[in-house]
Amino acid sequence: MKPLVSILVPAYNAEKWIGETLRSAIAQTWEPKEIIVVDDGSKDRTLEMARQFEGEGVRVISQANMGAAAARNTAFAESHGEFIQWLDADDLLSPDKIALQMAVAEQMGNSRVLLSCGWARFLYRYHRARFESTALWSDLVPRDWLVRKMGLNLYMQTATWLVSRELAVAAGPWDTRMLGDDDGEYFCRVLLASERVRFVPDAKVYYRTAGPGSLSYIGGSDRKREAQWLSMQLHMKYLLTLEESEETRAACVTFLQNWMIFFYPERPDVFKMANEKAKSLGGELRTPKPSWKYAWIQSIFGPRIAWMAQGHLSRIKLWVVMFGDKVLYHLDRPSFVSTQARPRSLTHLPSDAGSSD
């Protein structure tokens, strides 16, 4: 018997995308698999649309709104797979994503190895996604992986991972205090429980950019800032638990510096605590400054107004790009699953996966 893989989908107000996401899950060439959707008290038609797939092997659970981390915990508690595939309700998996990673897992025969793969962003047209490798797209031990993530300001998207149940149990549940970076904190714990990361280059994940409406968007929310600061402190604790050295301390200082743009100038208290932490690690933080384009605003109106102007303009630019991509998507609306031919082997992707046009 081949191992059962559980594809777990937390969903909240995802009626526009959950159909395509579930089709990409159903189309996975790996068998056996189970697909579990947890609707986290959606206010739109997400639950209704998910239930349309129950005849295709999808199990749907409804709960009161408690947040993404709680929905993931519910899904895991209801699952039975020996391996876990986390999948957000607006992202897509190439048809052989799980099969390619499972081939490596079976070959290695070690449930303490964590499997990852490549990913690319898209707005509406998945075929415009560009797969651009980073320093995390490698076989790495947990210490080196975290140093690269924190020191180079990188991350892996949630669905790229394939996690054995043994690792998931060892890591513990998702932290419901995390309002945005729940996956970043959770996979740190999975990494700590693992022996190493094995990167599977041909497996692919398509990550939809949702803009200000996404879970990871911090914006002006103090609750999300507090949660992010907690996540950052845990990140540093996890890395320094693995090894406290000049390199790991420097990675922590860089990590703090990169994230201060989300706290300054609105939260000088967090900036002060972060700088004290940086000094204890042998470094010191610089005061974040807006882009040079907004320097004149800062000189006249101060840093708060300059940061507000930069944030507003960035959101406007993203909205314009998203609107244009949406128009083109509706002019020629290809189905992700129908245009992804099933692979003839487990060593090649469909010819259009990762196409740039």
Image (tube, rainbow, N blue to C red):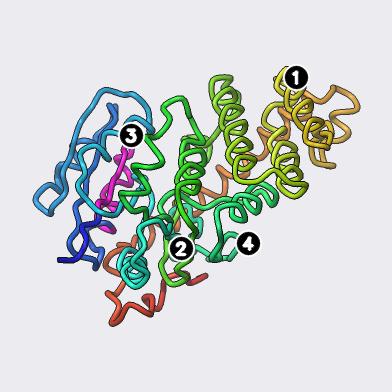
Q: Which residue is drawn at 66% across and 33% down?
A: 312
Position of residue 292 measured from the top left corner of the image (x, y, whole percent): 85, 42
Q: Residue 117 carries which label?
A: 2
Please say whether residue 23 is one of the residues in the magenta stretch.
yes
Residue depth check, mark 2 versus mark 3: number of the one nearer the observer: 2
- Amino acid identity at mark 3: Asn
The mark nearer the N terminus, 1 or 3, is 3
Instruction: Please tell me how crowded label 3 is: few (under 14), some (14-19), or many (20+) other residues with Cα within 10 Å.
Output: some
- Amino acid identity at mark 4: Ala
Instruction: Please tell me how crowded label 1 is: few (under 14), some (14-19), or many (20+) other residues with Cα within 10 Å.
Output: few
Using the numbered discs, state the Cα–Cα distance from disc 2 to disc 1 in whole angstroms: 38 Å
Using the numbered discs, state the Cα–Cα distance from disc 3 to disc 4 in whole angstroms: 34 Å
- Amino acid identity at mark 1: Pro
In this view of the protein, can residue 95 be seen by the observer?
A: no
Q: In the image as oriented, which residue stretches furthest toward the bottom?
A: 344
Using the numbered discs, state the Cα–Cα distance from disc 2 to disc 3 in whole angstroms: 27 Å
Position of residue 321 measured from the top left corner of the image (x, y, whole percent): 56, 50
Please say whether residue 81 is one of the residues in the magenta stretch.
no
Residue with the mark numbered 1: 268
Name the secondary structure under disc 1.
Answer: helix
Residue with the mark numbered 4: 135
| Residue 104 picture quarter | bottom left
Residue with the mark numbered 3: 13
Q: Residue at x 62, y 31 (%)?
A: 233
Position of residue 304 measured from the top left corner of the image (x, y, whole percent): 77, 23
The mark nearer the N terminus, 2 or 3, is 3
Q: In this view, does 341 lie above or below 51?
A: below
Q: In the image as oriented, which residue stretches furthest toward the left?
A: 55
Which of 176/140 is in front?
Answer: 140
Q: What stretch is highlighted in magenta?
A: 6-24
